[in-house]
Image: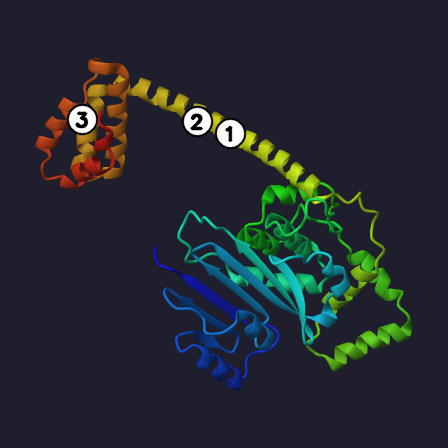
Amino acid sequence: MSEYQCYEFVALDRPLTPKQMAELRAISTRAEITPTRFWNEYQWGDLKADPAKLVERYFDAHMYFANWGTHRLMLRVPSARVDAKAMKAYFVGDAASVRVAGDHLIVDLHGEDEDPDYYEESQGSLGALAPLRTELMRGDLRVAYLAWLLAVGAGDVGEKDTEPPVPPGLSDLTAAQAAMVEFLRIDEDLISAAAAAGSEQSDDRPALRKWVLALAPRAKDEWLRRAIDDPDLALGSELLRTFRAEAKPARAAGRRTVAELLASAEKQRERRERANAERAAKTKNAAEAARKKRLDALAKRVDAAWKELEALVEKSAYEQAIQLAIDLRDLAKRDGASIPFAAPFEAMRKRQLRRRGFFDRWKRENEPKRW
């Protein structure tokens, strides 16, 4: 299997200038470069630049994946528009880190799978992941908590360490958060275990309206000044983030240790696997009962079924013909010599020599099983 790597970067707050695009073109002559996007894939070579440096200088979001199991997501967020103090507790170790770069925070997330079981060439979508940046700027700490769980799964957090505050709504993730879980392969049983101690996500717009109306005139004037000075400011998101940062948090349940979370996740996994096994067994039993009923009905019209099969072959209705032939073969296998299969099938083949498409397909898909 050859190597495969894919790099994608997007600029969200402002487009790249012609000078910046020329600088990026000097890094890669093959990349697709537009005022808002840089994309390239590699089978043998590699990007001739540090992705972290490119994010610092040019881009607001970056996604990388390689077919040996490495996935990476980076988000550049204006420091003034997030609660850096609240976020700090969630980013630990190498798998989930955050650092200051000028006026921005760089969120850097790594997911590793040392034994990927499929060839990756189109894993994840930066378009689906980019809204995580906006959610962070709204003060939605579910993104940060998921990053902490990523670090737990990577072994970057000690088992005696306690969890950071569990944000509300962890059991009801947004589309972008679900995409984050899938792309970084965060343990869903661990998420379920963590969510058990969280509260539901509530609609805080009524409380936000009340909070805004109660602001002092000078504070309201300051918000209006910011909107005038920064026309690109997402004022609603900024108000919501500030409100959430200042709102008195609900009394949280006792903080759990990592060991307790992992034990709870293991119990969750056992329950899920048991439920999946029970559903699979139920589905299998239903399918077997339906098949038995179908073969019982077929046994009452074997001669007519052979005529129907040959008619289907003559009409080149191979999909239906294959299924009927399989049923006749399985009926013969079930009921023994009383209902032969090989001899009438061979006789039909000699009569339908021109229908090689059906017999070639039968040989390729079914004959190795024999009858």
Q: Quadrant of the C terminus?
A: top left
Estimate the x, y position of residue 59 in percent, counting from the top left: 57, 73
Estimate the x, y position of residue 53 in percent, counting from the top left: 56, 74
- The amino acid type of the residue labelled 2 equals Lys
Mark 3 or mark 2: whose residue is earlier in sequence: 2
Q: Quadrant of the N terminus?
A: bottom left
Tell me: residue 234, above or below residue 303.
below
Say which residue appears at 41% left-offset and 49% top-offset. Answer: 118
- The amino acid type of the residue labelled 3 equals Lys
The residue sitting at the top extreme is 338
Say which residue appears at 75% left-offset and 82% top-offset. Answer: 229
Nearest the viewer among 202 and 92 is: 92
Would you name the residue on which mark 2 appears?
284
Which dot marks residue 277? 1
Which dot marks residue 258? none
Horizontal relation, residue 214 to residue 302: left or right: right
Residue 11 seen = no
| Dot 2: element | helix
- The amino acid type of the residue labelled 1 equals Ala
